[in-house]
């Protein structure tokens, strides 16, 4: 019986952990988009949502640390697995092409390291942009709270911000369209039928969740923050 | 027909190699790919040149000796075909064909297109066997095995160990080979006893030999001449995780 440390550092364990952290991050994305969509709710809904998170206090730090750990672990494993190939094949082929058929070599699978790297840089900028962005104040039920909604609506009226967000989110679609399937494959999905269904689910998940994410900046941009979906 | 060949020449493991080119005008569509290389070597020898070394044995797709990378694809363009069974009718007059050896740190080149696949033997030695008492071994048919399980074991056992999976994997991972060699034993009662130790030992050896990590590209399944599915890799992962708790 291998020890836990040995197991997670084995070639099997590294991939399994990449899958587990990946699934964790996908669950986070579902929570994230659910929260974002409250911007289309009652005028206070979005700020109540962000205030509820902020009011978690120390628990929020624990959740943030957990998320940061998942992101970092996922990144470290991804980079390490990608780097292992140079060691395993120091001299490459003059000519190389996929044989197709059951192969999953695609733009998405081959660019995981690049889309992942861009997402990581985006993540840092995204946190600086909103979490540490302008601190407007508002009142919720007579209590002062941060008006993050105002910041979001203001920022998404800037062309370069919207172009940047939509651009990076399109790369997330690519990353997820392979990542979702790959995560379940790493967790030992065996049957061919299940594999095909999971690949379909992978595309569906990537497209649906990202369309929801992209909809918010595009809607605010093209309606100037005054569309009927946003109530004041 | 005329075929323009470009092939890897390397005199030994530690000397740098290079590509050489040769145009063959006497190729006919009924030749197998290896027969075409035989003709190349005859012509080279008649010209007083060094022939191109390549691995082969049975030439009927069951031994796993041949594993050329042809135009960037292990065993060439056809699915579920070893390159000894690939025929020149798959090519057109005037085609250019690049032939390379499987590239992997764990498969050092011996000469030209011949590589040392001893790393596979060492993975098998690490655990790809069942321990039986010889001499007093019981009648194998006395152990009942479900048809489904024996069929699955047989499917995995068809792995001929050619190394195309490693050659085609962008990471040079040996996961499909190792998975198949584990799975064909694990589906039968004889293999059950040593199941946990086997998976840990073989996965460790795979890393020890310098093969890369699996990234789920599934290119291995696409090039496997006997069509081993990546479900073999899933079996390996399941067994490894189960071994952690055994």
Image: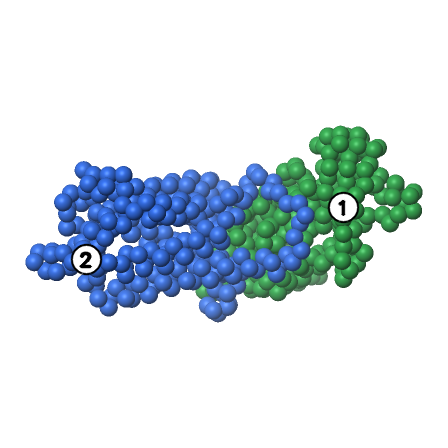
Chain colours: A blue, B green
Q: Is residue B146 left or right of residue A149?
A: right
Q: Name the side, left or right, on which A197 lies relative to B171.
A: left
In the rendering, at what x and y percent does residue B200 appear?
Answer: 55, 63
Is residue B202 visible to us here?
no
Name the residue tied to disc 1: B7
Q: Chain of mark 1?
A: B
Q: Between B217 and B199, which is closer to the camera in this rendering?
A: B217
In this view, the residue in front, A42 or A102, is A42
**Tag 2 subunit:** A
Q: Secondary structure at mark 1?
A: strand
Residue B57 position in % (x across, y down)? 78, 47
- Residue visible at 55% across and 50% down? B232
Q: Is residue A48 visible?
A: yes
What is the x, y in percent for residue B243? 49, 62
Distance CA(mark 2)–CA(mark 1): 68 Å
The answer to whether residue A225 is left or right of residue B207 is: left
At label 2, counting other C-alpha atoms closer than 10 Å, the crowd grade (few under 14, some 14-19, many 20 or more) is few
| Tag nearer the camera, 2 or 1 | 2
Instruction: Tell me whether the residue at label 2 lies in contact with that at label 1, contact meaning CB atoms closer than 8 angstroms.
Output: no
Residue A90: name its quadrant: bottom right
Disc assigned to residue A193: none
Q: Residue at x 55, y 54 (%)?
A: B214
Q: Which residue is mark 2?
A: A136
Question: In front here: B145 or B164?
Answer: B164
Q: Residues within 10 Å of mark 1 (few under 14, many from 20)?
A: some
- Residue drawn at point x = 79 percent, y = 58 percent: B12
Residue furthest to the left in view is: A142
Helix, strand or loop for disc 2 = loop
Could you tell me which quadrant the N terminus of chain B lies in? top right
Picture layout, residue A28 above or below residue A200: below
Q: How many marks overall?
A: 2
């Amino acid at each position: 019986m291998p020890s836990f440390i040995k197991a997670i550092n084995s070639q099997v364990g590294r991939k399994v952990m990449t899958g587990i952290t990946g699934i964790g991050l996908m669950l986070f994305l579902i929570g994230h988009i659910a929260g974002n969509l409250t911007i289309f709710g009652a005028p206070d809904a979005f700020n109540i949502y962000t205030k509820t998170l902020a009011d978690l206090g120390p628990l929020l730090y624990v959740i943030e640390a957990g998320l940061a750990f998942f992101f970092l672990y996922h990144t470290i494993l991804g980079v390490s697995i990608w780097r292992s190939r140079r060691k395993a094949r120091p001299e490459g082929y003059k000519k190389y092409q996929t044989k197709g058929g059951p192969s999953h070599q695609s733009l998405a699978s081959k660019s995981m390291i690049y889309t992942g790297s861009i997402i990581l840089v985006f993540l840092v900028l995204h946190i600086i942009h909103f979490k540490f962005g302008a601190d407007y104040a508002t009142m919720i039920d007579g209590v002062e709270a941060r008006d993050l909604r105002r910041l979001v609506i203001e920022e998404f009226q800037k062309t370069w911000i919207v172009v940047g967000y939509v651009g990076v989110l399109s790369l997330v679609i690519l990353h997820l369209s392979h990542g979702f399937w790959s995560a379940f494959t790493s967790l030992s999905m065996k049957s061919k039928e299940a594999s095909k269904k999971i690949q379909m689910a992978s595309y569906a998940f990537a497209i649906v969740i990202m369309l929801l994410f992209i909809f918010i900046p595009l809607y605010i941009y093209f309606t100037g923050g005054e569309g009927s979906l946003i109530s004041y | 027909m005329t075929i323009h060949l470009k092939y890897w020449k390397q005199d030994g493991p530690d000397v740098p190699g290079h590509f050489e080119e040769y145009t063959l005008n006497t190729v006919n569509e009924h030749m197998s790919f290896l027969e075409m290389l035989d003709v190349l070597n005859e012509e080279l020898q008649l010209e007083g040149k060094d022939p191109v070394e390549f691995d082969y044995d049975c030439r009927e797709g069951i031994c796993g000796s041949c594993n050329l990378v042809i135009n960037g694809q292990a065993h060439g363009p056809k699915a579920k075909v070893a390159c000894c069974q690939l025929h020149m009718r798959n090519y057109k007059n005037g085609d250019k064909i690049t032939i390379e050896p499987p590239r992997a740190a764990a498969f050092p080149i011996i000469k030209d297109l011949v590589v040392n696949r001893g790393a596979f033997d060492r993975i098998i030695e690490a655990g790809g066997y069942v321990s039986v008492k010889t001499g007093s071994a019981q009648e194998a048919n006395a152990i009942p095995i479900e048809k489904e399980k024996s069929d699955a074991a047989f499917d995995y056992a068809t792995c001929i160990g050619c190394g195309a999976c490693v050659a085609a994997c962008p990471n040079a991972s040996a996961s499909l080979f190792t998975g198949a060699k584990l799975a064909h034993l694990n589906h039968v009662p004889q293999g059950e006893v040593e199941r946990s130790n086997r998976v840990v030992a073989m996965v460790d050896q795979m890393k020890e030999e310098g093969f890369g990590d699996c990234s789920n590209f599934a290119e291995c399944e696409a090039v496997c001449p006997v069509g081993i599915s990546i479900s073999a890799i899933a079996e390996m992962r399941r067994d490894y995780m189960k071994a952690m708790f055994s």
